[in-house]
Image (cartoon, rainbow, N blue to C red):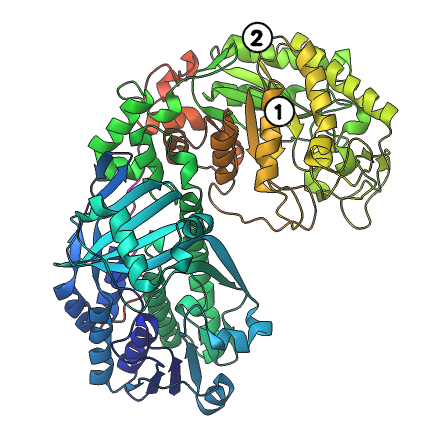
Amino acid sequence: MRVAIIGGGPGGLYAAALLKRLDPARDVTVWERNAPDETFGFGVVLSDETLGGIEHADPVVHAALREDFVRWDDIDIGHRGTHHRSGGHGFAALGRHRLLAILHARCRSLGVELRFSTEAPPVARLAADHDLVIAADGVHSTTRDAYAPVFRPRVTAHRCRYIWLAADFAFDAFRFEIAETEHGVMQLHGYPYAADASTVIVEMREEVWRAAGFDELDAQESVARCAKIFADALRGRPLRSGTSAWTTFRTVVNDRWSHGNVVLLGDAAHTAHFSIGSGTKLAVEDALALAACLAGQGSLAEALAAYEEERRPVVASTQRAARASLEWFEDLPLYLGRPPRQFAFNLLTRSRRVTHGNLRLRDVRFTESVEREFGCPPGTPPMFTPFRLRGLTLRNRVVVSPMDMYSATDGVPGDFHLVHLGARALGGAGLVMTEMVCVSPEGRITPGCAGLYTGRQAEAWRRVTDFVHRQSPGTAIGVQLGHCGRKGSTKVMWEGMDEPLATGNWPLVAASPLPYRPGGQTPRELSRAQLTDLREQFAAAAWRAARAGFDLLELHCAHGYLLSGFLSPLTNRRTDAYGGSLEKRLRFPLEVFDAVREVWPAERPVTVRISATDWAEGGTSAEDAVGIARAFAAHGADAIDVSTGQVVAEERPEFGRSYQTPFADRIRHEARVPVIAVGAISSWDDVNSLILAGRADLCALARPHLYDPHWTLHAAAEQGYEGPGAVWPAPYRAGSRRPPTGRTDAPKPRLSLGG
């Protein structure tokens, strides 16, 4: 096999060494356009997981790395004159020049041909002359560009400028330093990579960079200015630069990673922001996986498919974490006013990979100091602290999210609803929410949707609220009121979600006459008189909800239903007073909110669920979402339930763990209103992390409560908590200890390349 590798960075070199070591008969050549000692950046951070893979695959390289690694455990955070240190994090770093030298030596010893200061031939020629071409040519990959119609790359530029620098001393920890200057906020990321040297990255928003005049300074002047700004962190010592200059980070995503016998590796295939130290790590892990797949598959096509199948989920997870970290630093000014320890905890958990639970394992003293500052009583996890909304005090921060059950008859909830909601109330959550309860027969999504437009329905709901209040004292129950808008008259979910009914359809109404899906029913645009009627329907349903005994009311203005349809510019094309600017798009939802608030008891809270993004071009922006939240808060909303999407059928959501919480975080800090976070929050560790970091006030979970109605009580048991935030019903107390389980053994490593 003849192998051509374009790019002599760590990923390309390590791939070359592995392929040659596994099969010495392979002819492996690396083309690198730069000189051997020319590189970008100074230090490289690798995780213990990556080092373990290197040790299994090539003990020679691992031994050489081990001799040069600088290891440290602590992270220091400097913020407004305070410094907080958290330990137990476990980093290993070495100089990038040294890493390349080790890989150069290993490649030469194995017989890899290294061609420095040499541009690689055109990729098409290499592909014709070689059995395999590995494109490890970085973020600006010419290979990726040459086959762009196949790889379908998406390159996103972000809002901060940054520069790689170095200091001739070693920090004793990973250092984050925040500088609030007259021009704006700047941050320093620093870590040691040798006994006498540290990497220093200075980063700031583009507008801050320009306001500070960095766009007019040469390289030497920029370095001197950075050293002056961060003189305290550097203890007055200078900085130096290499070949790097101010740049903007770009996130690279490709729909495909291979084409014929050409495959992308490292930054050519994907990038992840330096704030989680992942670029070299991902490239080295790519090389390990590619070598393993080539060794374990019968053909090249099968090997490249297996490589992408194995690596893509790992990379996607890393990119989600990196994106969260990147955006946290972009929005850093939002968090500066938080209490010092909470600010530090927020920074440490920004990517959602470090959580409350594993931070307690790493540094229990630091974590307990954050909990005390937050107000957690001793031994009380953050999720079990109370929270007050108007006259209602919730005993913990867990909400059973609204979930459509499609099990009502003529809008009347029956035994199923009593058992379903009653079971979740007995399960310990602070607040249990109904599904979206519709305000009219025409406002139903499906024939199985529940309503509150008749007295009979209100009586049936009273049966549910009475059970909750009697059998699970301390648990609140809330009702979510809504109208389907253009998304109604469809089959129940398990018969065909969003598919029109075959028979028995009812007419739909919406802000504008736009069907939700091609071929779906086109709604009528609401007239002024119909808007008045709808407003009264919401008010009447709210009045019935109060008489039915609900503790909280939520107005559903999300997911493309009627009120959401007014808020989004993609679904509101009106030219009257209810369409156009955000202020006009808000007009009808606010009129409905005011009508509901007027009839709802003053001591009971009202929340509003919104879609903070439509996940579609031209839809609700982040600024719009904050403006919507502010408007409802100004009208008396007690909290905003921050969801996303489901507004247009052509949406492209960025799914992932806790993927919607950054929207809640931003609204909480910019609109200064309590928020309920939702969206793939599945563990009590996530809930604790979000609450303690100040990203959310309450956390709503849906599917976990379908899997386990007693999710909250089990979360308390697993954390050893027995306080007032999670009280077991008397008949269930005997089951408050987790049953023992059988022994499970850790799986063996998937693959070892040793031998």
In the image, residue 147 sits, relative to residue 54, either above or below, namely below
Q: Give residue 632's mark.
A: 1
Q: Is residue 716 left or right of residue 55?
A: right
Q: Give, as a single range, the part of the protein colored magenta.
A: 740-748
Magenta: predominant secondary structure element?
loop
Rendered location of residue 551, percent (x, y): 57, 13
**Residue 457: which quarter of the image?**
top right
Q: Which residue does the image show at 20% across and 49% down from the upper left?
A: 234
Rendered location of residue 407, percent (x, y): 69, 28
Quarter of the picture holding the N terminus: bottom left
Q: Which residue does the image show at 30% across and 76% down from the upper left?
A: 13
Q: Amino acid at mark 1?
A: Phe
Where disc 2 sits, the SS reads: loop
State how far apart marks 1 and 2 are (Cα).
Answer: 17 Å
Q: Look at the image and say whether residue 101 sits in the magenta stretch.
A: no
Q: Is residue 544 left or right of residue 217?
A: right
In the image, residue 133 sits, relative to residue 280, either above or below, namely below
**Residue 522: which quarter of the image?**
top right
Q: Is residue 45 visible?
A: no
Q: Look at the image and say whether residue 742 sits in the magenta stretch.
A: yes
Q: Nearer the viewer, residue 736 or 122?
A: 122
Q: Is residue 221 visible?
A: yes
Label 2 Cα crowd, 10 Å radius (few <14 / some 14-19 / many 20+): few
Rendered location of residue 172, percent (x, y): 15, 48
Q: Identify the residue position indicated by label 2 in the image.
A: 603
Q: Give residue 615's mark.
A: none
Q: Which residue does the image show at 30% across and 36% down from the upper left?
A: 344
Q: Amino acid at mark 2?
A: Glu
Where disc 1 sits, the SS reads: helix
